Image (cartoon, rainbow, N blue to C red):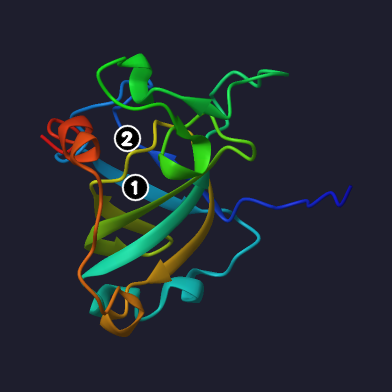
Amino acid sequence: MFNLTLRPIGYVHNARLSLDDDNWGSVVSEIRLDDFLPEESLDGIETFSHAEIIFTFDQVADEKEFSLSRHPRGNKDWPKVGIFAQRNKDRPNHLGLTIVSIVKREGRSLLVKGLDAVNNTPVLDIKPVFAEFLPRETIRQPEWSHELMKDYWD
């Protein structure tokens, strides 16, 4: 098996300490670059409205076995689906990806809104959002996923 080693480029700093599933929309986070990266690594990021943040769910228990097919959030009213048909934090590689609003850049720090990562989460990469990389077709998703996300960003 291929092993991949990734070095965090920085860490999330915010007031969110628990891994709760909802109410992420108003969370403002500071992503502070690690010392090995120069400050100019962020040059120009403030000219974009949004960024994609790739991070790791390092504070999720690393279960030796977890279900790769389950009812999202354990809700039996929703269909049992595979792990790759949901965005749960209990994943094979514990990776998260979120599009955030850029609030501002301050030196080695990027302030963002709507990052669903708790305090001290390692950040693996930051990418500006280009409209040309967003879906060009209408997005389709099942009704249960809309129900699941109802309070996620409130």
User: Which residue position holds label 1?
Assistant: 30
Where does the image place residue 49, in percent across and percent down from the top left? 20, 71
115 vs 62: above or below: below
Task: Tell me, yes or no, if residue 119 can be seen here.
Answer: yes
- Looking at the image, the residue that sits furthest to the bottom is 132
Relative to 65, is 69 on the left or the right?
left
Q: Look at the numbered disc 1 and give the secondary structure of its residue.
A: strand
Pick the front one: 86 or 44: 86
Pick the front one: 54 or 78: 78
55 vs 105: above or below: above
Which amino acid, by three-letter code, is at mark 1? Glu
141 vs 79: above or below: below
Assess disc 1: are there few (<14), some (14-19) or many (≥20) residues with their C-alpha within 10 Å of its C-alpha.
many
Relative to 49, is 79 on the left or the right?
right
> On the image, which quarter does residue 108 sit in?
bottom left
Q: Mark 2 near mark 1, Cβ–Cβ under 8 Å?
A: yes
User: Which residue position holds label 2?
Assistant: 14
